[in-house]
Image (spheres, rainbow, N blue to C red):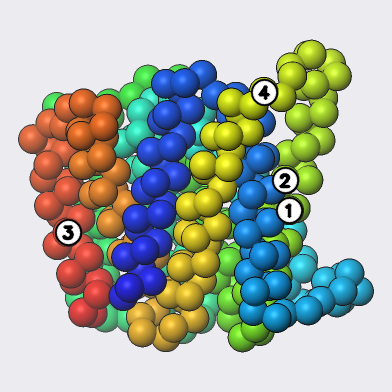
């Protein structure tokens, strides 16, 4: 449970950082690429600290390289969409769209990995969905500009596929001592794919990389590394199944980011939003003890 709690805290820190990108006029793409370089460097540093040696040949031939590359691509695409959505739609709605994606890995856990099915778990997941709805509505209506509906759907699918691939890799590809190398491939592949477009911006659109974007990228990269570290530890611990961990983390992030939005950005929540937060807390309890 400690790993789950730390995952919730560090992921919420990432979403809050995205909001500050807007406040300080940070270039999303530049900062996100620096974020991945930072997180990847932290993963390699962790390998060095723990005495984990590797060679390029090992990375190419390992079972986790292919899923890590897929996750890296999904991460760079989804991260940019989350950053843009947070600024255009708001932190609460973006969190909801991102966290609703839990449905995809939950179904993967239940039906692909034959995890325990129980009435209490399904009721908790149903309450979690209701919590997401109430957290995203104001006066009974979705409180975002409908022109951003496709963006929200893409955030949902991208995050869901990334999480599902991460779960598959944890079960089938990543050995007990390979976590940090797996993380390094994910983060550096995301940085590599993102750098292609960054070079386009630099040479065609004449966008220069600024120190401000580098600093905020580092600020984002630190909790990004720890989010994946704690989340993978939670999946591997065996304390709870993935069909429990994904909803618990997602509901926890909804609660924490909603509270943070009120404190840091003076965002106002409706009565329905508060009902959503309450339902999220109840859903966490039900899923945990299912």
The C terminus sits in image quarter: bottom left
Residue 128, how many percent across, how many down?
A: 25, 57
Q: Check if mark 4's residue and mark 2's residue have beta carbons within 8 Å.
A: no
Residue visible at 51% across and 19% down?
25
Q: The residue tagged with tag 4: helix, strand or loop?
A: loop
Q: Check if mark 1's residue and mark 2's residue have beta carbons within 8 Å.
A: yes
Horizontal placement of 145 versus 136: left or right?
Answer: right
The N terminus sits in image quarter: bottom left
Q: Earlier in the sequence, mark 1 or mark 3?
A: 1
- The mark lying in front, picked from 1 and 3, is 1
Q: Residue 116's quadrant in the figure?
A: bottom left
Q: Residue 63's quadrant in the figure?
A: bottom right
On residue 191, the disc is 2
Q: CA distance from mark 1 to mark 2?
A: 5 Å
Other-residue count near label 4 (Cα within 10 Å), few / some / many at <14 / 14–19 / ≥20: few
Q: Check if mark 3's residue and mark 4's residue have beta carbons within 8 Å.
A: no
Residue position marked by numbered label 4 in the rendering: 210
Q: CA distance from mark 1 to mark 4?
A: 20 Å
Residue visible at 29% across and 43% down?
257
Q: Check if mark 1's residue and mark 3's residue have beta carbons within 8 Å.
A: no
Q: The residue tagged with tag 2: helix, strand or loop?
A: helix
Q: The residue tagged with tag 3: helix, strand or loop?
A: helix
Q: Check if mark 1's residue and mark 4's residue have beta carbons within 8 Å.
A: no
Q: CA distance from mark 4 to mark 2?
A: 17 Å
Viewer-side residue, 122 vs 232: 232
Q: Earlier in the sequence, mark 3 or mark 4?
A: 4
On residue 188, the disc is 1
Q: The residue tagged with tag 1: helix, strand or loop?
A: helix
Residue 215, how many percent across, how many down?
A: 58, 34
Residue position marked by numbered label 3 in the rendering: 281
């Amino acid at each position: 449970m400690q790993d789950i709690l730390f995952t919730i805290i560090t992921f919420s820190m990432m979403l809050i950082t995205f909001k500050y990108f807007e406040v300080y006029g940070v270039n999303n793409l530049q900062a996100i690429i620096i974020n991945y370089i930072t997180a990847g460097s932290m993963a390699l540093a962790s390998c060095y600290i723990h005495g984990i040696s590797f060679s390029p040949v090992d990375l190419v031939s390992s079972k986790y390289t292919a899923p890590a590359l897929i996750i890296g691509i999904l991460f760079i695409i989804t991260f940019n969409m989350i950053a843009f959505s947070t600024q255009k739609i708001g932190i609460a709605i973006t969190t909801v769209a991102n966290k609703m994606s839990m449905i995809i890995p939950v179904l993967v856990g239940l039906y692909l990995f034959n995890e325990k099915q129980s009435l209490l778990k399904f009721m908790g997941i149903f309450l979690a969905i209701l919590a997401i709805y109430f957290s995203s509505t104001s006066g009974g209506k979705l409180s975002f500009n409908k022109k951003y509906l496709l963006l929200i759907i893409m955030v949902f699918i991208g995050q869901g596929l990334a999480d599902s691939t991460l779960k598959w890799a944890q079960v089938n590809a990543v050995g007990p001592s390979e976590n940090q190398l797996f993380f390094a491939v994910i983060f550096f592949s995301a940085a590599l794919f993102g750098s292609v477009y960054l070079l386009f911006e630099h040479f065609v659109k004449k966008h220069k990389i600024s120190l401000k974007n580098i600093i905020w990228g580092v600020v984002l990269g630190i909790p990004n590394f720890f989010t994946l570290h704690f989340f993978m530890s939670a999946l591997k611990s065996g304390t709870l199944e993935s069909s429990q961990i994904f909803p618990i983390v997602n509901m926890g992030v909804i609660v924490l980011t909603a509270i943070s939005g009120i404190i840091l950005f003076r965002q106002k929540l409706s009565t329905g939003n508060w009902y959503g937060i309450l339902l999220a807390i109840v859903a966490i309890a039900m899923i945990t003890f299912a």
